Amino acid sequence: RVHLDPRLRGKLDPSDLVQQTLLRACAALPEVRNQSPEVLASWLRKILARTLADTVKHYHRDRRDVNLERSLVLHQRC
């Protein structure tokens, strides 16, 4: 949650990122079997970082760019 751009927090759920990370890790698990816990933790952090980077790129492409979004809340004058 800490590493998410505030503009993306409404679009992304950290648990979805963790789930995607674990799916990628399961696919690559044979590469790191029999490694130490420290190596596995580092490996998972790298996959999480790549997953987060890929997701942020996804939301900055074309019409998904969060920088192009505008609030639908109308400002009322009191």
Image (spheres, grey):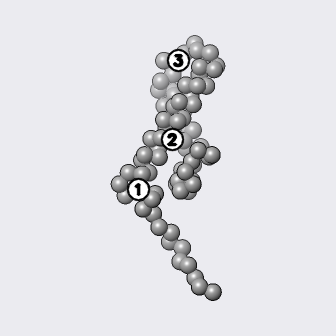
* Pointer 2 residue: 52
First in sequence: mark 3 vs mark 1: 3
The amino acid type, in three-letter code, at marker 3 is Val
> Residue at image x 62%, y 15%?
36
All told, the count of numbered labels is 3
Between 30 and 68, the one nearer to me in the picture: 68
Q: Residue furthest top?
A: 34
> Residue at image x 47%, y 67%?
70
Residue 23 shows up from this direction: no
> Residue at image x 51%, y 41%?
52
* Mark drawn on residue 32: 3
* Pointer 1 residue: 64
Residue 44 shows up from this direction: yes
First in sequence: mark 2 vs mark 1: 2
**Could you tell me residue 78's position as x and y percent?**
63, 86
The amino acid type, in three-letter code, at marker 1 is Arg
SS at circle 1: helix
Residue 51, relative to residue 44: is it above or below? below
